[in-house]
Amino acid sequence: MRNVLLVRMGEIFLKGDNRMFFIKALVRHIKKAVEGTGCSVELTQGRIFLRDITDMEDVIRRVTRVFGVHSVSPVVQCEKDMDAICREAVEMMKSLSGTFKCAARRADKRFPLDSMQINEEVGYQVLTACPQLKVDVHKPQHELNIEVRENAYLYVEKIPAVGGMPVGTNGKAMLLLSGGIDSPVAGYMIAKRGVQLNCIHYHSFPFTSEQAKQKVVDLARQLSAYAGPIRMYVVPFTELQQELYQKCPESQLTILMRRYMMRIANRVAHRANCSALITGESIGQVASQTMDGLCCTNAVCDMPVFRPLIGFDKTEIMDYAEKIGTYQTSILPYEDCCTIFTPKHPQTKPRAEQLAESEKLIDGEGLMQRAIEGIEIINIMP
Ligand code: ATP
Ligand code: MG
């Protein structure tokens, strides 16, 4: 019976002394992902096995989206005995056609046959029982893997998973999450590298609606399906935006607003023990994301700003969003605080000194403090 799943780790094998730290985190996340399905998760000899699976498809769906999992294989487990192994091999291969090869691994060196001999014997039995199959050792369509360990394990299928590193093994960062297409993808990419996410969102009630905020909560929840629990900081941004609108040059509105977003995010991130910021910016996509614009937003932060989409085209980002399942939510037509006070002719070559002059026209410090005091915290669970 195929009620066992073999889980392969991604890049964790590159690790040295702290390998176990990564493996333990991965096992913890896999356990969480299969909670309630009744299967058990076991770590033996550096490999992860899930046993007693009743709904294999459901478990595969859950496990293949855990960051740190490279691929999975439904496995048949049997006794370490050549008759049993050959019987299971034939059973597994009889519904397939085309070419195959056997790939045996003998981890238990006490087993009387070595891997070459296992290959020969199993190959012979499969060929005899399944005339529709042919052997091709160079480019086979199917690879029949036979592992002899504490038991014998057989598998053919290798289902790819998300890859990456277990969340939480690479610190924590603050994602500036808008309701757009880009920032959820940016957050996904960094979380995939093992970074735990916090999110910060700016809303300008009543210019932006309750639905616009709910959309961002929904996006964060979709991210949390991969990234685990996410703490979200919702910042009231209306007063600051109105002050900028009334007192500062119109052409600078967007970039000034972006600078205050970055400043506030930077402060909240320090308090939340995050060590970096994440945005969905990409060079040249809009006026505030020209090279000069990016320099001006960078200039107000004292922690690294990760922009994983920096070299991506919009269409590439859209494809990515489709793949991770955030696209349909992102395109819902609710207004964003960026779009309500948009200048007609935004500066594309802003200079930080000029912007700093404009910022003297408002009480930035007081406005930021009030915005931070008004933060609402929402804990998002997967
Ligand atoms: P997105 O699709 O992610 O909204 P965008 O193409 O609309 O990006 P901008 O509006 O210039 O670009 O925003 C650039 C980045 O600033 C976003 O990717 C996001 O990280 C951050 N950002 C923009 N608006 C907000 C907001 N209301 N709350 C939090 N972060 C925001
Ligand atoms: Mg946006």
Image (cartoon, helix red, strand yellow):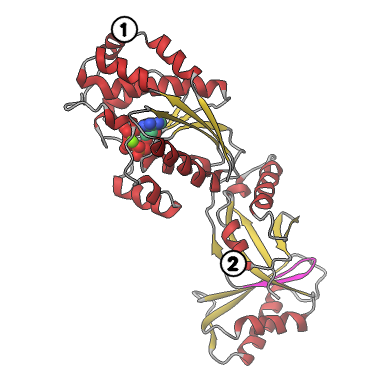
Toward the left, the furthest residue is 345
Could you say where residue 269 lies in the image, as x and y percent from the top left?
A: 52, 24
| Camera-nearest residue between 343 and 376 | 376
Q: Which residue is mark 1?
A: 360
Q: Is residue 369 above or below residue 303?
A: above
Could you say where residue 232 lies in the image, as x and y percent from the top left?
A: 52, 33
Q: Is the residue indicated by label 1 positioned so its CB lies within 8 Å of ligand 1?
A: no
**Was residue 154 drawn as part of the magenta stretch in this picture?**
yes
Could you say where residue 348 lies in the image, as x and y percent from the top left?
A: 21, 26
Q: Which region of the structure is painted magenta?
A: 147-155
How packed mark 2 is, by other alpha carbons closer than 10 Å (few <14, some 14-19, many 20 or more), is few
In the rendered image, is residue 310 in sight?
Answer: no
Label 1, secondary structure: give it. loop
Q: Which residue is mark 2?
A: 57
Q: Report the side of 38 relative to 364 (left or right).
A: right
Image quarter for ligand 1: top left
Q: Amino acid at mark 1?
A: Lys
